Image (cartoon, rainbow, N blue to C red):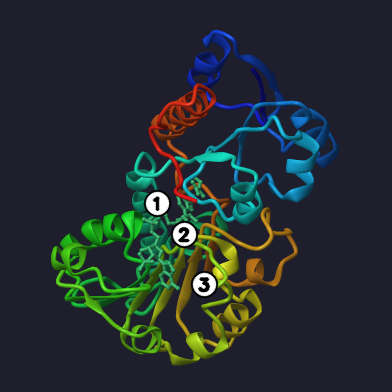
Amino acid sequence: MAVFVTRRIPAEGLRLLSQASGCRVQQWDSDEPVPRAELLAGVAGTRGLLCLLSDRIDREVLDAAGPGLKVISTLSVGFDHLALDEIKKRGIRVGYTPDVLTDATAELSVALLLSACRRLPEAAEQVKSGGWTTWKPLWMCGYGLSDSTVGIIGLGRIGQAVARRLKPFGVSKFLYTGNSPKPESAAEFGAEFVPLTRLAEESDFVVVTCALTPATQGLCNKDFFGRMKKTSVFVNTSRGAVVNQEDLYEALAQGRIAAAGLDVTTPEPLPTDHPLLSLRNCVILPHIGSATYATRSTMAVLAAKNLLAGLRGEPMPHELQL
Ligand code: NDP
Ligand code: DGY
């Protein structure tokens, strides 16, 4: 059974595949993304594909793979890079990595929120540049979480884990949006299900933790930012495309919202001359939500187990229901 792995992944995951009987592993053994031509050549004739969120798995890739491709395992919980309709049509099974990265991503979301609202990168820069001349009562002030209202767009696994971590900071109210209310999950935080417009208007902090879908693409746009308070902070750790970045830039540059923290952007990497990077009130990280050694290792093992189970026709530890 030929398998193509599109990147260098944590050794524990690759070892499982290499040691599996009957499994012949070919790998793009680099930290950099596989060039499209190499991906198309690499998948030809394979039965299994282990891919990353940066690989666009569309009809062209599936055609290049041929009818023998039976399983795709992505090293991610997000699956917006997979052409699911086409994959389903061809009877290919898909594995993904929910749960194991929830804690790491929620932790990073909180770190990013605090970095943005308390202006940590800006303040640290002042120390290095000599801008720190003395203790000043009105200098480097930001916004805190005590008695605040936090709005969560997408109260899923990561959204709930973020709320769980923020609650002890003294948040007084949680709001959330989604396709439908989740009374059982929301009860833990006393969170109220509200329309997106109300979430924008009432939240002091907005945290985006939803999946990227046609419905969430560009969800946070000019209208959304226009409804937010001037003192509010926006954080996105889901996918860059949920945000209209031109509208976010305008809102930040004109002081219509206080600050933003982004772990995800469009495109990735964000060009170093992108206007968002010129703003002092925007903290941007390079998509490191799940980047702890332990989490990435566990993700690789789970992705390998999903792939092997799929190849053997067994139930996967985490299979996406298509
Ligand atoms: P879940 O499936 O548990 O949660 C996704 C949430 O999105 C659900 O609560 C769902 O609500 C919500 N959602 C779907 N459509 C909408 C909508 N139109 N408006 C508002 N909410 C909506 O996934 P996870 O929590 O595990 O992961 C969420 C996403 O986080 C991933 O898809 C991925 O893109 C991103 N991610 C980013 C990481 C990073 O490194 N920055 C790391 C890991 C994940 P409902 O149930 O009502 O449909
Ligand atoms: C995911 O899993 O979807 C993240 O973006 C990376 O861990």
**Front-lying residue, 94 or 254:** 94
Distance from Cα at disc 3 to Cα at disc 1: 22 Å
* Amino acid type for the residue under numbered disc 1: Leu
Separation (CA) of disc 2 from disc 3: 13 Å
Q: Looking at mark 2, is its residue's CB closer than 8 Å to ligand 1?
A: yes
Q: Residue at x 53, y 19 (%)?
A: 11
Q: Secondary structure at mark 2?
A: loop
- Read off the residue under disc 3: 216
Mark 1 CB in 8 Å range of ligand 1? yes
Residue under label 1, please give it.
108
Residue type, label 3: Thr
Whether residue 142 is visible: no
Nearer the N terminus, badge 2 or badge 1?
1
Residue labelled with disc 2: 237
Q: Residues within 10 Å of mark 2 (few under 14, many from 20)?
A: many
Give me the C-alpha separation between circle 2 and circle 1: 8 Å
Residue type for callout 2 = Thr
Q: Nearer the viewer, residue 88 or 39?
A: 88
The answer to whether the residues at label 2 and label 3 have Cβ atoms under 8 Å apart is no
Residue 224: percent from left, percent from top: 49, 86
Horizontal placement of 149 versus 113: left or right? Answer: left
Please tell me which residue lies in front, 30 or 310. Answer: 310
Which image quadrant for residue 110?
bottom left
Q: Earlier in the sequence, mark 2 or mark 3?
A: 3
Q: Is mark 3 within 8 Å of ligand 1?
A: yes
Residue 196: where, in percent of width, then height?
Answer: 39, 83
User: Which mark is first along the chain, 1 or 3?
Assistant: 1
- Tell me the element at label 3: loop
**Marks 1 and 2: in contact by CB < 8 Å?**
yes
